[in-house]
Amino acid sequence: MSDQSAFAQLVEQDLAVIHRRRDAHAPPREAVEEAVIRACDWLLQRQQEDGHWVGELEGDSILETEYVLLLHFLGKADPEKVRRLCAYVLNHWQGPDGGMPIYPGGPSDVSASVKAYFACKLARIPPDDPRMERLRECILRMGGVTRCNTFTKLYLSIFGQYDWEGVPTIPPEIVLAPRWAYFNIYEMSSWSRAILVPLAIINACRPRRPVPPECAIDELFVGGRHGRHLRLPWDSRPVTWRNAFLLADRVLKVYDRSPVKPLRRRALKLAEQWLLERQRGSGGLGAIFPAMVHAIMAFKCLGYPDDHPAIQHELRELHRFEIEEDGETRLQPCVSPVWDTALALNALLDAGVPASDAAISKGVDWLLGVQTSAPGDWAVKAPGLEPGGWFFEYANEFYPDVDDTVMVLMALYKAACPQGEPWTSAPPRVRAAMERGLNWVLGMQNRDGGWASFDRNNDRMVFQYMPYADHNAMLDPSTADITARVLECLSFYGIGAEDPRVRRALGYLKREQEEDGSWFGRWGVNYL
């Protein structure tokens, strides 16, 4: 028996067990059908006039706290708005130990907690407020400010609450590295790239926005701020990638202090152009909160006035992330209309809503209108591949992703071929979109057989040892969940196990399976 046959047999056995257990505890069929009808009605009532769906996308407390810091950076910190933002953080995110987790019910995170404490002090919440006392005690138990990640230390340095010398250097010269170089910005994940390019500008300019003494956070340094060793510790083993990068950081700091930087002006100009180019066809840089905030700060460092179109564009898009409710303000990290519309259409069609229903037709038309038609950053690793993917948000032309694209492709197939016809029988406009999307997905397969989210072959693991890689998301490698969804999509388009691309993907999934039989999921439920 071949490995593939044995694998299929194991899957069938597991499914049989699941079905037996399900049938033993299944609710009455009528109750299930009634629930499905009510769920469909609920969805249909929430379709937007132009055909799309969009729900709230939740994030963690750093959204509100970093927004407070941005407002202070710009000198636009309306006290009432800051109060509402901090009220949401304290009322909804503070955990039982006093700290701030980065997901509901999770352990306290020192970086999120420090930013929350600083934001609350900027909101003039007294340090002897019981919530602040609990938060401060938790931060000190976790090691204090020096245990924060690089991005948090950079924020604090801007406001004079940390020493720039203790922040790992992000040199703007990284944008000058040619694309064939081992270390270049296109070897990082797309979201890291969109964050690090503006941060490199900020790091080079080292802006300062002093805060009043009563807003300082010296009390969050274990043993006091003065005399603390602020740099990242060396690895205990002498020869490691971490130590190599830390040594390079020391060299870069000497370069930063030098009056002669022959490449700095050119690097800053290229980084500026890179940011401006990626505003085209986007709802802000990367259409996501952290990159947009950093872009605004970077433009200010470059001397842009507040009313400059580049800054106003980012601010308008950030404002759309705000949700005001019950005297509080919270933010979304981005918006998800393409993903939500694809999910809604798949759910409605699977539930039996006819493909001819006007709601389905409107949803399909909306999706066809937001398919990408221009190359983005992904084209650096996939030259010659025709654009055809879909992004997550309303506008993000440079960053379509495989996951959204396959969800859209499945929705288009179910809507255009409701009787299981070949996809080539779809109406011409839909068929053309399907073909472009399918070819783009197939062209984004990685050399290991799997698929990632935004880029191809973005897997140079050495990048995770960089001093500013402590957000644990420097790379965009293949993942089991996206690869599995691609295979599900391909099955609708008649591409099965006999296809060499599918065989490579199945091989990848077999290699990635955990010992307990599950798979690690990065983009949704974990584990799978």
Image: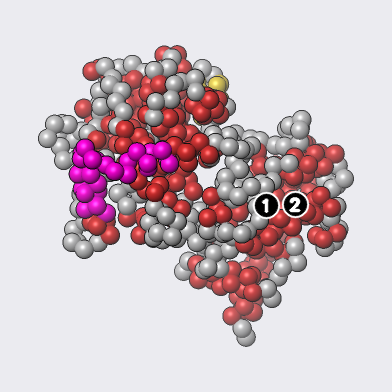
Q: Mark 1 falls on what kind of element?
A: loop
Q: Is residue 243 visible?
A: yes
For the C terminus, the image quarter is bottom right
Magenta-tinted stretch:
245-271
Q: Position of residue 459 (x, y in %)?
A: 45, 60
Q: Earlier in the sequence, mark 1 or mark 2?
A: 1
Q: Which residue is mark 1?
A: 388
- Which residue occupies the extreme bottom position in the image? 1
Q: Position of residue 318 (x, y in %)?
A: 52, 28
Residues tagged 1 and 2 counted as in contact (Cβ below 8 A) = yes
Q: Quadrant of residue 195?
A: top left
Residue at the image point whose x is 24% and y is 32% from the top: 162
Identify which amino acid the numbered label 1 is placed on.
Answer: Gly
Tag shown at residue 519: none
Q: Is residue 336 visible?
A: no
Asked whether residue 189 is drawn in magenta, I would say no
Q: Quadrant of residue 179?
A: bottom left
- Which residue occupies the extreme left position in the image? 227
* Left or right: where 366 falls relative to 163: right
Q: Count numbered badges in the picture.
A: 2
* Left or right: where 507 falls relative to 96: right
Residue at the image point whose x is 40% and y is 47% from the top: 175
The CA span between labels 1 and 2 is 7 Å
For the N terminus, the image quarter is bottom right
Residue at the image point whose x is 76% and y is 30% from the top: 49
Q: Position of residue 106 (x, y in %)?
A: 41, 42
Q: Which residue is mark 2?
A: 433
Residue at the image point whose x is 45% and y is 33% from the top: 295
